Image (cartoon, rainbow, N blue to C red):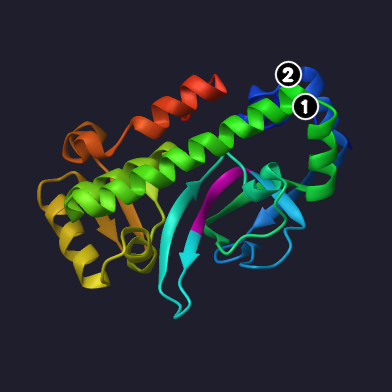
Amino acid sequence: MTLSKSSVRNRLLQAMSEDDFARLAPHLEPVTLSVKQVLVEANEPIEYVHFLEAGLASVVAISPDNERLEVGHIGREGMTGEPILLTVDYTPHQTFIQVAGSGLRIRADDLSAAMEGSPSLKGLLLHWVQVLMIQTAQSALANGRFAIQERLARWLLMCHDRMDGDDLPLTHEFLSLMLGVRRSGVTEALHVLEGVKIVRTSRGRIHLLDRARLEEIAGACYGLPEAEYARLIGLPLKN
């Protein structure tokens, strides 16, 4: 059954014109996304692109000696497999599901063909690439110039932006990957936030109690990619 634009939750699909959405709709296939499921494998051809409807995906850079760091964070505001939009069929980065959810997938060839037939669709999706590049650059800036407390606040806000409610199903293992620090450093930073009643933690879950104060801690570390998303895509990143 062909999807209707009114039925989707993905923000990129919502931002498309009716004509552009109609180009993709017959090729979109609903899928369930499980934790640690790999959507893009490093250095292998990208067969499918996923428009997330729920959950979170991580884009991870991997060194030759298998050091790993998250460089991209994607929820229902975006799509995975962005190299396809640049006519590149594989990437050295891996993309996997960090928080279980669902999405709509389309074959990379079908998406490329639709883009060739529509300058407006191509333009919108290239704007998404620009937003993701800005997010990656801001992550590098945060890692190099901001303290762990500020960086943790930023990542929690980014997760909150992409999920429903205030419960964030994030493990210390994933937070360690996101921040590029040891798990003990994550634990200590979370204890500080918990001590001032900004978050409440339990096994594999963080409950956000005070977003305004979390934004104060993040300061200049947070907000630029989110503003650029609204400017370039035409919708706020968060529903």
Could you say which disc has been placed on residue 17 in the image?
2
Residue under numbered circle 1: 21
Residue 192: name its quadrant. Answer: bottom left
- Name the residue rendered at 42%, 37% in the picture: 161
Amino acid type for the residue under numbered disc 2: Ser
Q: Which residue lies furthest to the bottom in this view?
A: 65
Residue 227 at x, y percent in the picture: 40, 25
* Distance Cα–Cα, label 1 vs label 2: 6 Å
Residues under numbered marks 1 and 2 in contact, where contact means CB atoms less than 8 Å apart:
yes
Horizontal side of residue 118 vs 222, given as left or right: right
Please say if 177 is above or below 88. below
Q: Which SS class for mark 2?
A: loop
Q: In which quarter of the image is residue 126?
A: top right
Q: Where is residue 3 in the image (x, y as percent from the top left)?
A: 81, 33
User: Is residue 156 found left or right of 86 in the rendered image?
Assistant: left
Residue 27: horizontal and vertical position, in percent? 85, 41
Q: Quadrant of the N terminus?
A: top right
Residue at x-position 80% and y-position 41% = 112
**Residue drawn at (35%, 48%) of the image:** 139
| Mark 1 neighbour class, 10 Å CA radius: few under 14, some 14 to 19, many 20 or more | some
Q: For the residue carrying disc 2, how many other residues have a C-alpha within 10 Å: few (<14), some (14-19), or many (20+)?
A: some
Asked if the magenta segment contains residue 58, the reply would be yes
Q: Horizontally, is 117 left or right of 236 in the view?
A: right
